[in-house]
Image: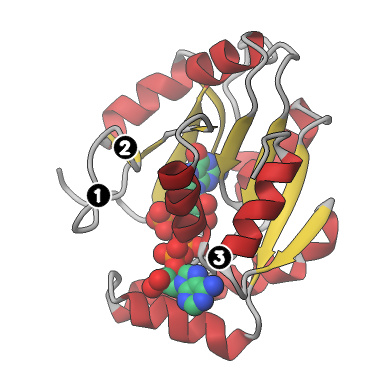
Amino acid sequence: MPPEVDHPGAATTDESTVRAAGPASGGSAVPPGGRVVVLTGPSGVGKSTVVRRLRRDHPELWVSVSVTTRHPRPGERDGREYHFVDGARFDDLVADGELIEWAYFAGNRYGTPRTPVRARLAAGMPVLLEIDLQGARQIRASMPDAVQVFLAPPSWDELERRLIGRGTEAPDVVDRRLAAARIELAAESEFDISIDNLDVDLVCTRLLDLLGLHP
Ligand code: ADP
Ligand code: 5GP
């Protein structure tokens, strides 16, 4: 799959990008039922690590698997971390109203499939969405009862250390992600709850509580 062509403003999470992205019109809102927790935070803060730990220790928890046009990282498996698709397939999903929300992030597109989320909520199950700031804003508009959680780094230096230390992105992509991180950190006060990611287990316990599951 060729790399996704960059999009103007893709490295930023500004308002114009929020307006440019978004759920396709015509899709009905996801019905109420189970509770929805949105987990957002700057790239490198530890969101995937937290989600991986939750899945490992709590198989009863369902985490939405997003669609993305980015390439898999080593160790990522299609259908587990993401559904990896090309740009044409992503276009179709948007056109067909199959995404609850979607956004450009650092040169790629990411979106939340509607049908599985709808099914879990209809069954009264909690749902965890790990998405970026633009997606969180879209969910805030379409699902105002969702609990919005911001995962914060202990410091900027530590965020840089984690992102660079992960070693999965080229330096220019790291720079884009750090530029987006500044915008995401500035939006922290929009969120219902902020959790500092100092200890992954403590973060997981807090999220399980918010999801209505017993740690
Ligand atoms: P994100 O999904 O938010 O981009 P990752 O989960 O990939 O971030 O984490 C980025 C790096 O930070 C990884 O190398 C991970 O092992 C590390 N990390 C995550 N949480 C912590 C933590 N609480 N303390 C120290 N390092 C952490
Ligand atoms: P990564 O490439 O590091 O896996 O993810 C980059 C960013 O995309 C992260 O902030 C992550 O939370 C976000 N992201 C992952 N899935 C989705 C999604 O379905 N929608 C939106 N809006 N962002 C997502």
Q: CA distance from mark 2 to mark 3?
A: 20 Å
Task: Specify the farthest residue to the left.
Answer: 1
Q: Residue at x 27, y 75 (%)?
A: 170
- How packed is label 3: few (under 14 Cα within 10 Å), some, or many (20 or more)? some
Residue 202 lies, with reference to residue 63, above or below; the image says below
Left or right, 153 with respect to 47, comes to: right
Question: Residue 199 falls in which quadrant of the image?
Answer: bottom right
Report the mark closest to the observer, 3 or 1: 3
- How packed is label 2: few (under 14 Cα within 10 Å), some, or many (20 or more)? few
Q: Position of residue 144 (x, y in %)?
A: 83, 31
Q: How is the image coloured?
A: secondary structure
Q: Residue at x 64, y 75 (%)?
A: 182
Q: Position of residue 134 (x, y in %)?
A: 64, 48
Residue 179 lies, with reference to residue 8, above or below; the image says below
Residue kind at label 2, given as amino acid type:
Arg
First in residue order: circle 2 vs circle 3: 2
User: Which element is circle 1 on?
Assistant: loop
In the image shown, does 161 or 210 lie closer to the viewer?
Answer: 210
First in residue order: circle 3 vs circle 1: 1
Question: Residue 150 falls in which quadrant of the image?
Answer: bottom right
Left or right, 7 with respect to 152, comes to: left
Residue for badge 3: 200
User: Is the shortest distance between ligand 1 and the CB of mark 3 under 8 Å?
Assistant: yes
Residue for badge 1: 76
Quarter placement of the N terminus: top left
